Amino acid sequence: MSEAPDKTATRGGLSFSAVAALYSVIVPLISPVVWFIVLAGSNGYLILASTVASCLLGTGLLAAVASLIRGHERRRYLWIAIIGLALSAALGFFSLVFRSMPIC
C-alpha cells in the first residue's frame, strides 16, 4: 500500500465523508431556529417557513446519504452519519406533516 495522502481531504484535514456526516447532524439542530426566523420575518407565512426548513432538512438527508455511500475511515463518522440521517428524516417528515395541516 502506498503512503500517498488522501486526495479527498479538505483544508482542515477532514474527508468529504466526515464533513458531510457533521453537516447532516448540524442541519437538523439549526433548522427549527431557521424555521422560526423565517416565520417571524415573513409575518406568519407558514408555507414559506416550512418550505425553507424542508429544503434544509433535505440537504442534510442528502449529505448523510452521500457520507454513507462514500465510506468512512473512522467508525465515529459512520455513527454520526447514521444519527444525522435519522434526525433529518424524522424532522423532515414532521415539517412536511406540519406544512400540510390546515390552520383554523
Image: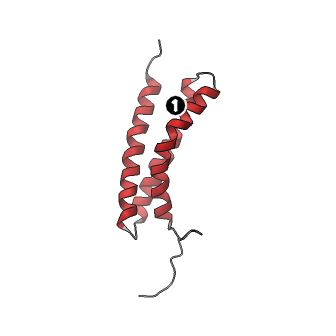
Residue in the image at 60% along x and 31% along y: 38
Q: Nearer the viewer, residue 65 or 46?
A: 46
Report x, y in % for residue 15: 50, 68
Report x, y in % for residue 94: 40, 33
Report x, y in % for residue 31: 51, 40
Q: Is residue 99 above or below residue 77?
A: above
Q: Is residue 90 above or below residue 82?
A: above
Residue in the image at 50% along x and 77% along y: 6
Quarter of the image holding residue 21?
bottom left
Quarter of the image holding residue 51?
top right
- Element carrying mark 1: helix
Q: Is residue 74 above or below residue 34?
A: below
Residue in the image at 47% along x and 43% along y: 29
The tally of labels here is 1
| Residue highlighted by disc 1 | 50
- Quadrant in the picture for the N terminus: bottom left
Q: Can see residue 44?
A: yes
Q: Residues within 10 Å of mark 1 (few under 14, many from 20)?
A: many
- Mark 1 is on which residue type? Ser
Seen from this angle, which residue lies furthest top? Answer: 104
Seen from this angle, which residue lies furthest bottom? Answer: 2
Q: Nearer the viewer, residue 96 or 74?
A: 74
Q: Can see residue 62?
A: no
